[in-house]
Amino acid sequence: MVSIFLQSPTFLTPLSYPFSSRSSTKRTQHGASLSLRVTASRSSFDVVVVGGGIIGLTIARQFLTGSDLSVAVVDKAVPCSGATGAGQGYIWMTHKKPGSDVWDLTLRSHELWHKLAESLTDDGLDPEELLGWKKTGSLLIGRTTEECVALKQKVHELSEAGLRTEYLSSAELLLKEPAILVNDNTGAAFLPDDSQLDAHRAVAYIEKGNRAFATAGRYAEFYNEPVTGLIRSDGDSKVVAGVKTLKRNLYGKKATIVAAGCWSGSLMHELLKDCNIPLDVPVKPRKGHLLVVENFDSFHLNHGIMEAGYSNHQSASVSGLDVDERMLSISMTATMDTSGNLVLGSSREFVGFDTEADEFIIRCIWERAAEFFPKLRDISLEDFIRNRKVRVGLRPYSKLLASNAPNQKYLKPAFGMFTKPELFF
Ligand SMILES: Cc1cc2nc3c(=O)[nH]c(=O)nc-3n(C[C@H](O)[C@H](O)[C@H](O)COP(=O)(O)OP(=O)(O)OC[C@H]3O[C@@H](n4cnc5c(N)ncnc54)[C@H](O)[C@@H]3O)c2cc1C
């Protein structure tokens, strides 16, 4: 979720291309300041980006590589402390619907990640090492006749939309992914071009590229500095001149961008409450758990995998849980990351900003995965607990991205609001 306060609308252009072309990628390879954080005593930049998740950092990257503007990224914690660090890293088309309102954006994002990975290879670099990039292909698994009929239809639609895809019978699926349990009712949609990345590696790569611009005075990071208010250009005007953090004022001479993930809604509400500007940013946190099983050698997965029911919100039906209110759903997702860890997902629920790991949900994810991969049942609970790590994150969720709500036009461009500050149209 991105909100943008522009001093001039001409700065919209770079945001349409969140990743660089080959030449600009190459530029970021040289002279980057490795893992050092880059901060600055100055307080005035062309652009201030609030939020150092994957969205904020790639916006910063695009300004740096695609213009000569200076950029500051400010985060209340550090990159990967939000949803980005918890994600499974699927760069997938298979669970998207051609023609839906996120289709074009998803397609573009898919294309840009692929281009970035290809450009690294062309430059003699290893995208798997730098981004955790693996072109595994995706398998969307159906286990009932109805699901398989729907998957065949999906394959047809995706293929009509121009994607490489095929429907796999249970025998064909077993050949591709021997660890999965199949029967006569099992089938899969297979998209060979779907890929995955490791968010921590991808963020480190983007940060390193951004930091290469620090020596020229064009980039600075202000981490562990929550933004607490907006600076308006002359006291109570509606022109946004920057942000206040707990430690300093940061001025964005040309634009101030809020890319604070699931916090964008509450933050914008807080920032605008004294401005007399009625603006609702309808984004809320959708909590998700993932399990990472380290030192995993019981079986190998060749693809990224997801159950077809993922889009149908499988509900965890255990008595005592208010699943309706929480809208808790658990669906199987499974992949191996670049370190050989088994990554199992995932849950989705609305429980506010809570990020505590929930043992019940962890067990549901494990048991759901064991329905698909019977060898997991051979692993003792002690071994599982000893080798598991749990990732919990809050996805930025907004219905407006997926529906035709009347005020959707405010959010459509790049999931943000492109506004002249004096108008807030
Ligand atoms: C379990 C799980 C699995 C997922 N799997 C996938 C997947 O396979 N594929 C996929 O595409 N997506 C996946 N996602 C979704 C994806 O992770 C998010 O959509 C994405 O990371 C959002 O990035 P972001 O930069 O908008 O948000 P975030 O990463 O949350 O970044 C927002 C940043 O804003 C900062 N911030 C908040 N408030 C303030 C403030 N007041 N001042 C300063 N900074 C502030 C936060 O500290 C944070 O660093 C998954 C998410 C989860 C939880």
Image (cartoon, helix red, strand yellow):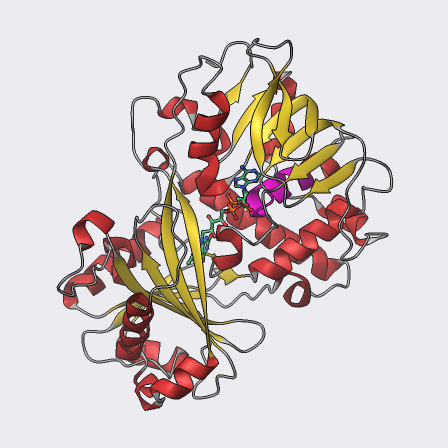
97 up-or-down from 120: above or below: above
Which is more toward the observer, 300 or 297?
297
Q: Give the vertical position of 208 relative to 360 (above or below).
A: above
Work out whether residue 56 can be spotted: yes
Q: Position of residue 388 (x, y in %)?
A: 45, 77
Question: Above or below — where is 261 with respect to 329?
Answer: above
Q: Position of residue 46 (x, y in %)?
A: 73, 26
Q: Where is residue 105? Give x, y as percent.
A: 47, 40
Residue that lies at the very extreme toward the left in this rendered image: 319
Residue 83 is situated, as x and y percent measured from the top left of the image, at: 48, 51
Q: Is residue 115 magenta?
A: no
Q: Would residue 243 be found to the left or right of residue 98 on screen?
A: right
Q: Nearer the viewer, residue 242 or 123?
A: 242
Name the dominant secondary structure of the magenta segment.
Answer: helix
Quarter of image, res 74: top right
Q: Nearer the viewer, residue 145 or 31?
A: 31
Quarter of the rendering containing residue 276: top left
> At x 74% / y 37%, what residue is drawn?
64
Judge whether 405 appears above or below 19 on screen: above
Q: Residue at x 23, y 73 (%)?
A: 186
Q: Is residue 162 visible?
A: no
Q: Any magenta on residue 60? A: yes
Residue at 60% across, 50% down = 79
- As rendered, which of 225 and 109 lies closer to the eye? 225
Q: How many marks?
A: 0
Q: Residue furthest front?
A: 246
Q: Which residue is pictured at 76% across the width and 57% down the height?
A: 35
Q: What span is in magenta?
A: 52-61
State left or right for residue 242 relative to residue 151: right
Q: Is residue 374 left or right of residue 11?
A: left
